[in-house]
Image (cartoon, grey):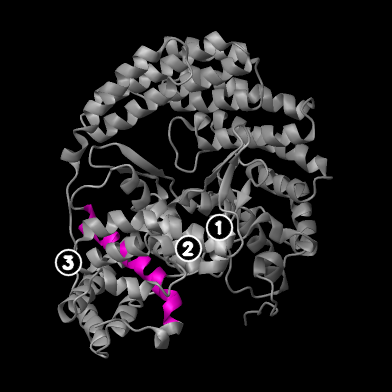
Amino acid sequence: MALEAPSLDLPTWLTASIDDFRRADFEAPIAQCTSADCNDLSIEYRRFVANPENEDELATARAYAMLSAVTNFHFKPSDRNTPYGPMLVTEDRRSAIPEDFRGDPLLALSYAAENATSPVLRARLCDVCWLLDRKRQDFGRAAITAYGDIVDGLQSGTLKERFEHSSAPLGLTARDAIRRALSIARAINWSSAEAERARELALRTQALAIEATNPVPVYWFFEMDIDFSISAPDLLAGKIENYLNSQTSDSSHMVIELWRLAARARHYAKDDEGKHRCQAMSAEALAHEAEKHTSAMLAAHWLSQAIAEYHGIPGKRDRRAQLRHKLIDVQACISEEMSPFSQTMDLSDIAADAIRQLQSSESLVDLLLIFANLDQSPSPQRLTAEAKKSIGKHPLASIFGASFHDDEGKVTHRSEGGGFGDQDGSGAILRQIMQQESIRRTVLARGQIHIARHHIAERFYIGDDTFHFLLQHSPFVPRDLLGTYSRGFARFFAGDYTSALYVLTPMLENSLRTVLKMNGFDVTTFDDTNQTQEDATISALFKSSRKELDRIFGENITTDIENVFLLKPGPSLRHALSHGLLKDDSPYGPDAIYACWLIFRLCCIPLFRQREYIELPL
């Protein structure tokens, strides 16, 4: 009859004790494993008995479960402070991380680390024990030695890459093992014998990479050399340049990265002339990469990078100008590579609902206030939550960064990707929010705002005086701009969206300043040099007075204003309108229609409670 493990709040992989490890042959499952990858060890441990029959098997199962969890961390050797993370994260749980093993579990792991013979297992256990208890430098030194043994095993053939291939000594496992060994050595004692061995191992592997034909490992180990200051920077830069000058192939992007690395080494060596020479070589490699591509978008990408690479290099102004002219010519062809796509949406139910709301009253004042309340600005928390949920369902769409182009092919905004769980993903989240908000604004503009506006305009004559009488009650509208606001909304309800957008958008900035001043906040900027003051722009207000705006309007509305008028990759209407970037059809798009409606809503929100005091002339 199978024994049942005791019911504990802790997961099984945290319940093993020193006694469990003493009773178990804890390396038995990996005795025949030749993989240098800890994840393969974790798989072997998970294959152990699921139904222990006696106390010894139960103890062994607990020990194996703990070792399976420890060998299943996400290894991030480039992150010196947090080299391990969870392999799996969901909404309500995650897999193991080193911090889970503090306390009694660490004692059990320490025993296993002291007695492990497999270099792969010993490296992981000693590393984790030292990471959790930095006073145990003996574990740190043992981890450095074990990582070196892994690399020696890969180079001798006694250990294999997880996905075996001919270049195992120069693969990811060897790279990560050496980098982690160097990180620990620098934290413990850079002059110790273990640290010296790690440095020698890095240089030896670097020499193997130079002799091979693949430039990727060459870059890895040159970068490692400069990161840990193993070689003098001027000697390292010379070594990189000699390698590059000996290469006949120019097809690899790593050539560009190697020239950048050489420039970095020259910078550390305080050799400005050498640094500029290497930067220029990198820029020319980028320009050459652009010439090889038939895709205008890819060519524009490489040309943009080449121009940026030339920045700050003396005597290269003419070359930069030449590349900029070439970039403009290439960008003109980007639109030919774009293919439009459309998604049909049935908005009849939404439109019918808007009409039903308007048919509930015969009063023009009521209809205008109903129109202003067709929808409400969503909360930023909800937008973020929905964006994360969408990213979770379709993660591949947000892993990589994105560039946004205007009609002429110029890149107007670059958005970072979410990465593979090692970044905060704010760029991907913002991009997803803007996509979802674009859909919401389209549905509202086409399905409700346009329909409701037309319905009201058919039933009533609406002129400047209509809004003059209505808006005189609104503190959002400055007294000296009442006529301008009235003209803008009159044109909006007449269907002249061009006039409405160009009149109302600048008024928003003035109204925000007015409301802030009414609440006692300073809305000016002071120039210390000239001792002059100017009214803050809307962009400046959102930077310096965001908390005050949130307090007055609520963060839902201020976020909505920011998404529509200011932020990229959103429509950024305030910038586009101010600099003449809008096209003739832009004011008739859903973003512009929504923007005008949002300003009308801001004007009407204070009127909802004053309805009984508002009367319009017939």
**Residue at image point 50% right, 25% down:** 219
| Label 3 vs label 2, nearer the camera | 2
Badge 1 amino acid = Arg
- SS class, disc 2: helix
Q: Which residue is mark 2?
A: 558
Asked if residue 181 is positioned above or below residue 275 in the image, the reply reads: below
Q: Do tag 2 and tag 1 residues touch (Cβ < 8 Å)?
A: yes
Name which residue lies at 46% across and 30% down.
167
Mark 1 vs 3, N-terminal side? 3
Q: Quadrant of residue 107?
A: bottom right
> Magenta stretch?
586-608
- Check whether the beta carbons of the residues at disc 3 and disc 2 lie within 8 A of each other: no
* Spot occupied by residue 267 in the image (x, y as percentages of width and height): 59, 17
Magenta segment: does it hold 601? yes
Q: Judge by depth and name the residue closer to the eye, 568 or 2.
A: 568
Q: Residues within 10 Å of mark 1 (few under 14, many from 20)?
A: some
Calculate the distance from the C-alpha at mark 1 to the C-alpha at mark 3.
Answer: 38 Å
Residue with the mark numbered 1: 546
Residue 16 rendering spot, x and y as whole percentages: 73, 65
Point out the tag, 2 or 1, that comes first from the N-terminus.
1
Query: In which quarter of the view is residue 457 placed?
Result: bottom left
